[in-house]
Image (cartoon, rainbow, N blue to C red):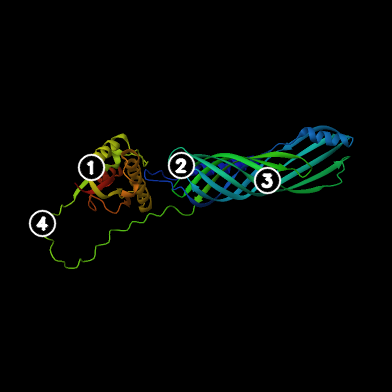
Amino acid sequence: MKTITATGILAALALAVMVVPARADDVVDHGGWYGGFGLGQSRARIDDERIANSLAAQGFTQTSIRKDSSDLAFKLLGGYQFNRHFALEGGYFDLGQSGFSADTQPPGRLDGTARFKGVNLDAVGILPITEKFSAFGRVGVQYAATKTTFAGTGAVLVADPERREKDTNYKVGVGLEYALTPRLGLRAELERYRLDDAVGNKGDVDMASLGLVYRFKTRAVAYTPPVPAAAEAAAPPPPPQIAVTAPVLKSVTLSADSQFDFDRAIVKPEGRLVLDRFAVDLKNSRYELITVQGHTDSLGSEAYNTDLSIRRADAVKSYLVESAGIPAGKIETRGLGESMPLTQPGECTGVLADRVACLQADRRVEVEAAVTR
C-alpha cells in the first residue's frame, strides 16, 4: 500500500507539466531565495547477513526473513541561488521507516523497524541545458535522528527494545529541473543519505522524489522614461564663426521572429550580420551612447513580456561588446515589453494564429546611436 500511495502522488505531480500551459515568452530568472518540497519513496538496504549473525550469537538459527525496505518519504527545502550555476540549500527530511521480520529455530520471531529524519545543508551545482531545463548535482552534510525498535516473540527475547541515535553524515544527489513558469519549477531527484542505524552500523538510504520549487522574487525590471530636460535659460546666440554639426541618428531594427531563436534570447546568424553592418557603420564615428530597446507583443502577461524584452536587449549588447569591441559602458539596454507597440489597439483580432501574425511588428529590438563625424 505504501508503494501504491507514493507512486500515485508522484504521478499527480508529473501531471503538472502537462496542465501548466507552455508559453513562448516564459523566461527563467536565475538568482535569489527559493523554497519548496519533495515527495517520493525511500529505500533502505537491510543487511540479512548481519541479522542472521546476531541471532546466531544468541543461539538461534534464522529460517526466513521478510523485509519492508520502502516507505513514503518527503522533504522541505529552502535555499539561495547565487547565479545560474551555484546555490546553497538547506532543509528537513523524513525518510519514513524500514523493517524486517525474521523467523527462527527454536521457534520464535524477531521484528525490527528503523525510522530516519533530520536536517541537511547542501552545495548545489547547476548545469543549464536550455532556458527552462537544467540538471544539477548536490553534496552536503546531514544531521539525522534514528529510532530503532525491536520486538521478540516465542523463544526470542529482546532486552533492549528501543534505541536512539543522532549523528552527522554526508549526503549526495542528482536531479533535473523544468521551469513551469519563471517562478515555479518541477524537480525530479535521486538522493543518497548515509545514516547510523542506532545499533552500531552505518548504511545508505536512497530517496527518489518529485517536487516543486518556488522562487520568491524574480528579477525586477524597472524602466524609467527619459526625463524631459529643464527649459534652458536664454543665452546669447553663438558667435557666427562657430559651426554646429547636428548629430546623425544611426539605427537598426532586429525582428524577434526571424533573428532570435524561438523562446530564447540568443541572436541568430541573420541578426549577427545586421549588427556587424551596424558596427562597421559606427566605425571611425563619434558617439556618446548606443541605446538598445527590447519590445514584445501584447500576448501573455506583462511580467513575462518585460523579462523577455530585457533579456533580448542584453543579448544584443553582449554581441556588440564581444564581437565588435564596443565598450560595455557605451551601451544602455532597456526592456520595454509590450508598452510601445507599432500596431494600433484593436487592429489585430481573430483567432490566435491571426493575432500572432498581425502583431509581428511589435516583436523587435531597436538599436540607435547619435553619431557625429
* Dot 1 crowding, Cα within 10 Å, few <14, some 14–19, many 20+: few
First reached walking from the N terminus: tag 1 or tag 3: 3
Q: How far is disc 2 from disc 1 in space, using C-alphas? A: 54 Å
Characterize the local packing of mark 2: few (<14), some (14-19) or many (20 or more) Cα atoms within 10 angstroms: few
Task: Read off the residue under disc 4.
Answer: 241
- Looking at the rendered structure, the secondary structure element under dot 3 is strand
The residue that disc 2 covers is 18
Image coordinates of residue 345 in percent, x first then y, are 24, 53
Task: Give me the C-alpha separation between circle 4 and circle 2.
Answer: 72 Å
Furthest toward the left, the residue is: 240
x then y, percent, for residue 210? 56, 43
Q: Residue furthest bottom?
A: 233
Q: Position of residue 269 (x, y in %)?
A: 31, 34
Horizontal side of 317 relative to 169 (left or right) equals left
Q: Amino acid at mark 3?
A: Gly
Which type of secondary structure does the marked residue at label 1 adopt? loop
In the image, what residue type sits under mark 1?
A: Asn
Label 3 or label 2, whichever comes before in sequence order? 2
Q: Quadrant of the N terminus?
A: top right
Q: Which residue is disc 3 drawn over?
A: 96
Q: Which mark is residue 284?
A: 1
Q: Give amino acid for label 2.
A: Met
Q: Which quadrant of the structure image shows residue 20?
A: top left
Q: Position of residue 164 (x, y in %)?
A: 77, 49
Mark 2–mark 1 CB contact (< 8 Å): no
Q: Which label lies toward us, 4 or 2?
A: 4
